Image: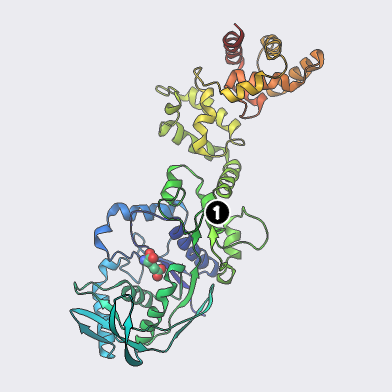
């Protein structure tokens, strides 16, 4: 069999929709699975929207997701140019081929494609008038996902508009043909166009490519597909919110595909190995934010600590996210950086996303942290927190420095001595030094804060609550 050539053919709208990203991903996966080529082609016949920024959104998004293209803009290739706006001469050549075959005619300034078949007139309910219809042979599409689809075109259709611009169906087919595309993997919304496309391929004397139409992505709640107004529908939003790109990509793979067991977190190389067109599900996929967050947290936990710390630093300090939590980062030097690294090492396994980090860690960097009211009520309404805090304070004061092992041993000894459970020490102490009842491991927390800081915060808390 000849080499597989697939393509992703976005129109630059200024957004990179999750559905488009998944189409790009499935094409990329199929190319990598088969050892074929993945082509990027820009369908920018609508010139007004073809701005540099609109293109950058797509290029950045694809690169962020790791979807490298083998041919296309910024990469080149033998089948260029890869922008439809630069391919006018190709389209005119192909129009001439159809004209030579007697398959086009002009009417009212537009150029039409002539269907083959018996002609008759019929009332068109949409146009509200009599129109000429054609009994054309149905096109049979053996769609790799949808199965056999049959559809007959009934009317000649426009190829070039009055203003001289070629229409989508024409340029799409000419490009797929001249770029040697073997498999067209695209959104289900294009299924209804496919009979037109098959007509054109055959008029050019070639067999249509293999088609695979991917089902829609439905919004999380309610009917209808994800639209760009729905939260979570744009790739640039995940970039901005600092999701882990591998997690987003893994999640997108599951929107219409699965490894046929119930695993969800899979290495991309394994997905490439397992992925195939018949394996794509034909029913619609539903967006599931929880699953995406779960995967994001899992990828975050498992990434090398150096990468996690870099990500955290660039968001919290580089982008100033810590400042928004009231932390003064002006004048931070290598000492602060070392402390920052310790905090991140401690928090990596517990935080669920980079965007949660500023709130999750702010108290490590300021004395002016919030005391969470709910947590406060919950923790302080149990037992005798004032007595417990006073006792643990005495024990901590007596230690030369805090280490996790020693702390654990001392708190256990204290609880044996007084008969209070270790939790009666741990929960109020955590509240006193961090203002909350959630966070990293307790002994790690005290160790990273250090003895002086912990004692200072315990004193301040005792004074504030019972002073
Ligand atoms: N430009 C079309 C779109 O964005 C591509 C259609 C196709 O993949 O054939 O929907």
- Percent x, y of residue 273: 60, 64
Residue at the (43%, 46%) spot, across then down: 237
Q: Secondary structure at mark 1?
A: helix
Residue at the (52%, 64%) spot, across then down: 29
- Percent x, y of residue 253: 55, 58
Please say if 378 is above or below 150: above
- Percent x, y of residue 354: 51, 38
Q: Nearer the viewer, residue 411 or 169?
A: 169
Left or right? Give the position of 214 relative to 127: right
Residue at the (72%, 19%) spot, across then down: 424
Residue that sits furthest to the bottom in the current view: 118
Quarter location, residue 95: bottom left
Q: Quadrant of ligand 1?
A: bottom left
Q: Report the colour scheme.
A: rainbow
Left or right? Give the position of 259 relative to 225: right
The number of numbered discs placed on residues in the rendered structure image is 1
**Category of crowding for the residue at label 1, using alpha-carbon neighbours closer than 10 angstroms: few (below 14), some (14–19), many (at least 20):** many
Quarter location, residue 41: bottom left
Disc 1 residue lies near ligand 1 with CB under 8 A = no
Can see residue 447?
no
Can see residue 124?
yes
């Amino acid at each position: 069999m000849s080499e597989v050539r697939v393509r992703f053919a976005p129109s630059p709208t200024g957004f990179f929709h999750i559905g488009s990203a998944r189409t790009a991903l499935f094409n990329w996966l199929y190319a990598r699975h088969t050892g074929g080529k993945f082509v990027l082609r820009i369908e920018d016949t609508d010139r007004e929207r073809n701005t540099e920024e609109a293109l950058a959104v797509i290029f950045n998004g694809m690169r962020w997701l790791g979807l490298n293209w083998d041919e296309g803009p910024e990469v080149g290739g033998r089948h260029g140019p890869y922008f439809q706006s630069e391919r006018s001469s190709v389209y005119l050549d192909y129009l001439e081929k159809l004209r030579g075959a007697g398959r086009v005619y002009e009417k009212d300034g537009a150029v039409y494609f002539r269907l083959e078949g018996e002609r008759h007139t019929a009332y068109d309910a949409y146009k509200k008038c009599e129109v000429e219809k054609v009994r054309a042979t149905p096109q049979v599409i053996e769609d790799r996902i949808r199965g056999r689809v049959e559809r007959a075109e009934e009317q000649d259709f426009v190829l070039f508009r009055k203003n001289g611009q070629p229409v989508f169906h024409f340029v799409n087919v000419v490009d797929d043909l001249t770029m040697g595309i073997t498999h067209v993997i695209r959104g289900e919304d294009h299924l209804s166009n496919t009979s037109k496309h098959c007509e054109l391929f055959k008029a050019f004397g070639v067999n249509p490519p293999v088609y695979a139409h991917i089902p829609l992505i439905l919004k999380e709640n309610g009917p209808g597909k994800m639209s760009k107004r729905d939260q979570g529908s744009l790739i640039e939003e995940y970039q901005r919110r600092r999701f882990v790109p591998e997690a987003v990509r893994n999640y997108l793979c599951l929107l219409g595909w699965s490894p046929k067991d119930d695993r969800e977190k899979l290495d991309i190389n394994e997905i490439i190995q397992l992925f195939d067109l018949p394996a794509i599900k034909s029913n619609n996929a539903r967006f599931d934010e929880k699953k995406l967050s779960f995967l994001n947290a899992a990828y975050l936990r498992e990434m090398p600590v150096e990468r996690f710390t870099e990500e955290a630093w660039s968001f919290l300090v580089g982008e100033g996210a810590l400042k928004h939590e009231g932390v003064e980062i002006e004048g931070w030097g290598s000492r602060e950086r070392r402390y920052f690294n310790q905090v991140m090492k401690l928090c990596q396994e517990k935080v669920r996303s980079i965007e949660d980090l500023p709130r999750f860690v702010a108290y490590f960097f300021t004395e002016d942290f919030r005391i969470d009211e709910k947590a406060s009520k919950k923790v302080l309404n149990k037992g005798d927190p004032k007595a417990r805090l006073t006792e643990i304070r005495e024990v901590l004061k007596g230690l030369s420095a805090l280490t996790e092992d020693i702390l654990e041993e001392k708190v256990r000894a204290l609880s044996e001595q007084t008969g209070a459970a270790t939790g009666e020490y741990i929960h109020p102490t955590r509240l006193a030094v961090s203002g909350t009842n959630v966070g990293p491991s307790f002994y790690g927390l005290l160790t990273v804060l250090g003895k002086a800081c912990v004692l200072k915060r315990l004193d301040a808390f005792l004074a504030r609550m019972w002073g």
